[in-house]
Image (cartoon, helix red, strand yellow):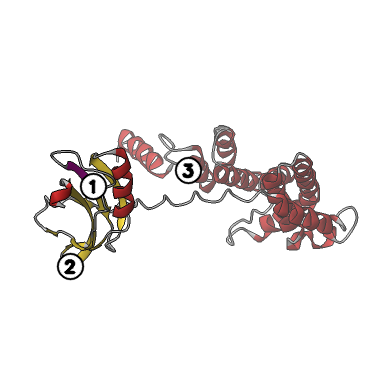
Amino acid sequence: MRPAGMLAACVVMMLATSPRLHGQDPLASARQLYAAAEYEEALRVLDGLPAAAAREERQTAELYRALCFVALGRRADADRALETLVTQNPMYRPADDLSPRLRAAFTDARRRVLPVVVQQQYAEAKTAYDRKMFVDAATGFRRVIDVLNDPDMAQSASQPPLADLRTLASGFHDLSVKAIAPPPPPPPPPAPVVLPPRIYTGDEREVVPPVAIHQELPRFPGAVRPGGVKGVVEVLIDEGGAVESASMLVPTIASYDKLLLAAASRWLYYPATVDGKPVKFRKRIQVTINEPSQR
């Protein structure tokens, strides 16, 4: 092969085997650079991770930062990266495929950092409690208890100043939960719409009008004027056949209207029906009082 052809082939091979960074996010690029043993370049890419990156991305970035530092023999920098990782998430645990060397370094970092972190968490939760921010306080004290129960904290949690912290955090957690105001009760369901019963008048084809059982007119007081006395009384008959209300549509005379309405309140009927079921019915009754000779 000619030299020019050999050079072109080498360039193609380099492009094919080098990390493909263009258009990739920083974490993906850092992973490829780490796999290609480009540790310094991977660290530069990780430094460019946006400040607004998600929590999981920041945790992964710190882990890869520690891996790069370990590979470069920079143990102090690796320890600081691991401490940052623990501070960001005290309960974080790396995947099982982490090398024994780095796993041991991570465990040591947790044992150094967690006692400080848990005291800070307790102070923040107690401040929230003192400010009556009971939801935040309960959450904070729960985190304190979880950290104190972590196996890597077994030795530190049994010694001052953390020996009594679990008891205090548990007590304040219970008080915070009790102090949280219960949610407001749900609004009562809307009252069912109860439509008033329909009142029939006899104009409806489906109604069978009421039949009078007792519908007696009172005696007319005094003399009847020539031509007699006429009027119209309207009664509302309920489903039981009793008169619910009575009124004069066409009055007679005041004294007789009073007697007539009193008598109407005692009238009784077989109730009107629709499909065999009793219904309310408004009935108009013509009242005619003739002269004495015709009574």
Q: CA distance from mark 2 to mark 1?
A: 24 Å
User: Could you tell me residue 241's position as x and y percent?
Assistant: 26, 62
Residue that mark 3 sits on: 28
Circle 2 sits in a helix, a strand or a loop, which is it? Answer: loop
Which SS type dominates the magenta stretch?
A: strand
User: Could you tell me residue 265's position as x and y percent?
Assistant: 32, 54
Q: CA distance from mark 3 to mark 2?
A: 82 Å
Which amino acid is tagged 3? Ala
Question: Which of pointers 2 and 1 indicates the residue nearer the eye?
Answer: 1
Q: Residue furthest left?
A: 205
**Residue 73, visible in the rendered structure:** no
Mark drawn on residue 54: none
Question: Which of pointers 3 and 2 indicates the residue nearer the eye?
Answer: 2
Q: CA distance from mark 1 to mark 3?
A: 91 Å
Q: Which residues are magenta?
A: 229-234
Which amino acid is tagged 1? Glu
Circle 1 sits in a helix, a strand or a loop, which is it? Answer: strand
Query: Image height check: is 227 above or below 185?
Result: above
Q: Splitting the image into 4 quarters, where does residue 99 fall?
A: bottom right
- Labels 3 & 2 near each other (Cβ < 8 A): no
Q: Residues within 10 Å of mark 2 (few under 14, many from 20)?
A: few
Front-lying residue, 170 or 27: 170
Mark found first going from the N terminus, 1 or 3: 3
User: Could you tell me residue 191's position as x and y percent?
Assistant: 41, 51
User: Could you tell me residue 13's position as x and y percent?
Assistant: 37, 42
Mark drawn on residue 276: 2
Mark drawn on residue 234: 1
Front-lying residue, 208 or 195: 208
**Residue 212, visible in the rendered structure:** yes
Q: Is 153 a magenta residue?
A: no
Query: Image height check: is 193 above or below 47?
Result: below
Residue at 48% over, 51% down: 188
